[in-house]
Amino acid sequence: MMITQTTPTPELVASAMTYEQYRILATELFEQGRTTSADAHYNTPEILGYTKMNLARMSRLDKQTVIHPQLTEAVQAVAGRWTWLVLTESWCGDAAQALPVLRAIAGESIPLRLLLRDENPALMDAFLTNGGRSIPKLICLDNASGEVLGSWGPRPAALQAAIVEWKAAGDLTFEHILENTQRWYNADRTESIQNELLTLVRRWSEVI
């Protein structure tokens, strides 16, 4: 596997935030009437309303998320070998659902570092989803080589497929799609993301 120009540099990784630093930043900016993005499109009253809900959901998931024992075991087996770098923004609903779970999965075994999508367009463009800058996007880095072992995101595959269907049907508003998405996450209770990450952790651990 070759290191490419889109591979995150050690300097970029070193500049990334911890989960705790990101939570503080997102909260402080929200209290100032802003999201983590400087783009005016993501700082409207409507988007700030979504951001308020995102912060509340993250706090709830921080307290309630329980990781499957087999996933914890798989992650502990690669302790010290990887860093997880995640592109995110505070206005993103999928990020609010995923980040607390990723933090719980990583635990003390895998450093979790966060970068803002809009401040890192070149890196984001190397990890597009169907041509879009969808977030969150987790990038798994090998600490020894700096190579990218793989990525995950922006949401569980089953939800991604459902959203594609909802949009294709053409009879749901954006607000209805958001409501359906939230109901899906509530019913799933982090099962899908945990199962997908277990599969990926096992796959990435086989990469030499």
Image (cartoon, rainbow, N blue to C red):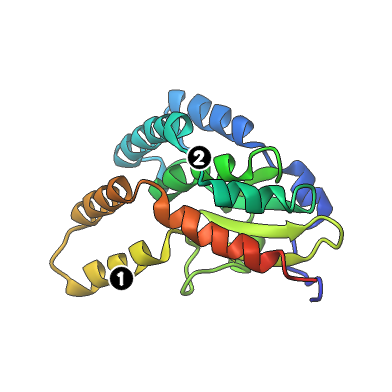
Residue 76 drawn at (x, y percent): 70, 47
Q: Residue at x 79, y 76 (%)?
A: 1
Label number found at residue 164 = 1
Using the image, tell me which numbered label, if any, was put on residue 100. Answer: 2
Kindly state the secondary structure of the residue where label 2 is placed.
Answer: helix
- The amino acid beneath tag 1 is Val
User: Residue 80, how many percent across, how many down?
Assistant: 79, 48
Q: What is the distance, in whole Å, between disc 2 and disc 1 at their CAs? A: 25 Å
Q: Residue at x 16, y 62 (%)?
A: 172
Inspect this view and state whether residue 124 appears.
no
Looking at the rendered structure, the secondary structure element under dot 1 is: helix
Give me the residue at 44% from left, 23% from top: 31
Where's residue 156, x and y in %? 42, 60
* Residue 136 shows up from this direction: yes
Marks 1 and 2: in contact by CB < 8 Å?
no
User: Residue at the location (38% across, 35% down)?
Assistant: 57
- Left or right: where 173 falls relative to 42: left
Q: Is residue 64 above or below residue 164?
A: above
- Labelled disc at residue 88: none
Q: Upstream in the sequence, badge 2 or badge 1?
A: 2
* Closer-to-camera residue (140/187): 187
Between 46 and 25, the one lying in front of the other is 25
What quarter of the picture does the C terminus occupy? bottom right
Q: Residue furthest left?
A: 171
Q: Is residue 77 above or below residue 205?
A: above
Please state which amino acid type lies under the numbered disc 2: Pro
**Residue sitting nearer the eye, 174 or 75:** 75
